[in-house]
Image (tube, grey):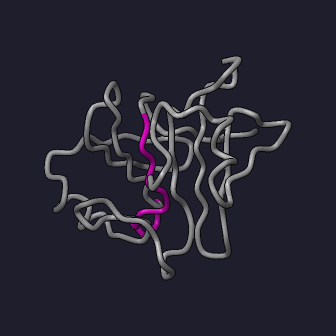
């Protein structure tokens, strides 16, 4: 996601413009403005967490990142399925998701709003599924 990559040290992210880490949540770096929020998170049990998950949340009308196939927050379920035929399906704490790729190598999850079936969050991760919370 931009300059942030899976495997980067979370502690190095505040060197990038706008990223911050809270003392109570040293395993996650946050970036945001009024239209877009980004989270890069690692494992809270690691002494030097590395990024294993990057999530994009935010406005469905403002500027937002998209995959190479043009899918991002605000895309419809139909657009995700057309761009990624045969993608896996499941659910997380925030609702149903569609996954492309293998988590062992970094998969992309499109979490949908249950009612509108539009993308509410895009997550790139090496985890089995997107996290339900980052700094609970």
Q: From which residue to which does the magenta span run? A: 114-125
**Location of residue 134 in the rendering, given as x and y in whole percent from the top left corner:** 66, 40
Q: Which residue is nearer to you in this view: 127 or 48?
A: 48
* Above or below, 69 relative to 74: above
Identified at 67% across, 71% down, the residue is 33
Give the residue at the far right of this rendering: 23
* Above or below, 102 relative to 73: above
Q: Quadrant of residue 102?
A: top left
**Location of residue 61 in the rendering, given as x and y in whole percent from the top left corner:** 49, 82
Identified at 41% across, 30% down, the residue is 126
Q: Which residue is nearer to you in this view: 128 or 12?
A: 12
Give the residue at the far bottom of this rendering: 61
Confirm whether the magenta stretch covers residue 120.
yes
* Above or below, 6 relative to 33: above
Identified at 51% across, 45% down, the residue is 54
- Quadrant (top left, top right, bottom left, bottom right) of the C terminus: top right
Identified at 42% across, 49% down, the residue is 96
Q: Quadrant of residue 23?
A: top right
Left or right: where 59 falls relative to 126? right
**Location of residue 71 in the rendering, given as x and y in whole percent from the top left corner:** 31, 64
Confirm whether the magenta stretch covers residue 85.
no
């Amino acid at each position: 996601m931009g300059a942030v990559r899976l495997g980067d040290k979370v502690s190095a992210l505040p060197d990038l413009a706008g990223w911050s880490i809270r003392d109570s949540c040293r395993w996650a770096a946050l970036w945001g403005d009024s239209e877009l929020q980004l989270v890069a998170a690692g494992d809270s049990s690691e002494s030097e967490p590395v990024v294993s998950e990057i999530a994009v949340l935010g406005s469905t009308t403002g500027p937002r990142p998209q995959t190479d196939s043009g899918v991002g927050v605000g895309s419809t379920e139909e657009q995700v399925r057309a761009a990624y035929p045969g993608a896996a399906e499941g659910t997380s704490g925030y609702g149903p998701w569609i996954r492309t790729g293998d988590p062992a190598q970094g998969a992309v999850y499109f979490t949908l709003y249950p009612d509108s079936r539009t993308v509410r969050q895009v997550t790139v991760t090496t985890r089995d599924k997107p996290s339900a919370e980052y700094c609970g």
